[in-house]
Image (tube, coloured by chain):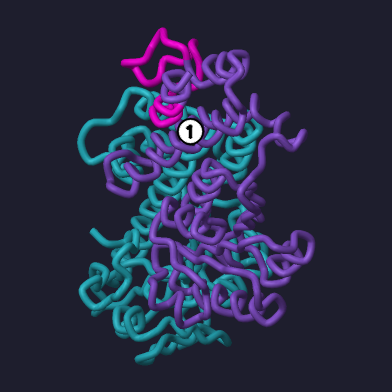
Amino acid sequence: MTELVDQIALCVERGKVNLKSPFPPDLKGQKGVDELTREALEAGIKAQDILEMGLIEGMRKIGVRFRADEVYVPDVLMAAKAMKVGMAHIRPYFTSGEVTRKGLFIIGTVAGDLHDIGKNLVSMVVEGGGFEVVDLGIDVSTEKFIEALEQRPGAILGMSALLTTTMANMGESVLAVKARFPQTRVVVGGAPVTENFARQIGADAYAVDPQAAVDYLNSLVA
Amino acid sequence: MGISPEVFDCQFDVPALSRRKRQIARAMGYRKEVPDLVAGAIDTVCAALEGSCRPRGGFRVCSDIACDPDGFRCEDRYFATGTVIAEYLARSERIVLATATVGAGYAELKEAYASDDDLLMGYVLDAAGSEFAELLADQVHHQVAAFGRDRQLGCSNRYSPGYCGWATAEQKHLFALLPPGFCGITLSASALMTPIKSVSCVIGLGREVVKAGYRCDICTLENCCKRP
């Protein structure tokens, strides 16, 4: 049983979606996350265990390797694709309550900024980390961040900016969010953002890469 | 100096995008080998962009200008570019406002990949789209430089709101001085251009203007895409 879950984790990490998928080349012709997740459920392995030790573990590994510059964005995307296919089998168990998410994460790129690659990676890796993710997209105004939090109390908030000139908008949004929801935790990131800047604007955390975002969220729910 | 607005549409060499596949791969982090999956995706995306996009671009030459250490005035608009860019434009006798766009075809492709939930193709498209926009901006820049050469004027590098500390909000000044709907590009309330993968910039022309590289040595932004 452990072997099956370990194989799921490996296939997520390597981006092996299903039997038909030619990627990665060295796993061609082998079962992927799709088949293995179905098999694991049919074998009676708990959905929560498949999620945590298979799917989440696989995403954790690719996140760590991405942080170490061992793999590139396309590798993370393929892992996320594989994860999604596995999640499709697990989803009914969320509905029944048998499997639970760790928490809710709302993320968006700040107003005036249309860059979304980093934000999308964080979304995928955080979802792969067992959280429900609401992605507000790009060019998100302060009002939109606040509206999202009003609709989903208790969520953790993430903001991304890729231009030094839109970082000011990040500061304004964090200030407004904290004034309205003092208990909401805010994590920020993006190429020009630094730990120092995060501290200056009153954010609770700075994530230098997607895995750091997951690590921070995990620290809040531990 | 009198006001003598001159507005030009640009012509483009679209197939040139296929010659930038290596740059597209580099933009995604691949310095040496490119995996077959990614190389194939780049091939597919480049062909799709060349086939479906309808790029447009153009520029307006403004003579009613005044430069100072913090920016420049162009007609009734003041551009607070900051000292870095202002220094490069200081000797300008004319300011050129230029735009280029990959065109609406890009958004259609993006939507198609998104509806297929094809994350990889969406990412490759984004990288290729950015390279395409820069390629078009290069061609506009060349045509501006040729305009300058014909008048014995040197040409500066191009500078865009959002970089080197120049606020993106100043896109509004730039577009206010262009004909409405110029090159099919519009600006949102938060100063974002539509279609996406559009570029806007200013270029200085003058007898003593030279094209300088970005002064990355004085900038604190380590991860800027303009860094060599």
Characterize the magenta stretch by its predominant secondary structure. loop
The relative height of residue A109 versus residue A177 in the rendered view (above or below) is: above
- Reply above or below: B47 against B153: above
Residue depicted at x 51% and y 21%: A33
Quarter of the image with the N terminus of chain B in it: bottom left
Q: Nearer the viewer, residue A161 or A153?
A: A153
- Residue with the mark numbered 1: A53
Residue A26, by quadrant, is top left
Q: Residue at x 48, y 87 (%)?
A: B73
Residue A30 is covered by the magenta coloring: yes
Instruction: Give the side of residue B181 with respect to residue A215, left or right.
Output: right
Q: Amino acid at mark 1?
A: Met
Residue B180 in view: yes
In this rendering, does residue B59 appear at all?
A: no
Q: Residue at x 24, y 79 (%)?
A: B208
Where is residue B16? Give x, y as percent. 36, 37
What letter labels the chain drawn in purple?
Answer: A
Which of these two is toward me, A21 or B227?
A21
Chain for colour cyan: B
SS at circle 1: helix
Q: Which residues are magenta?
A: A9-31
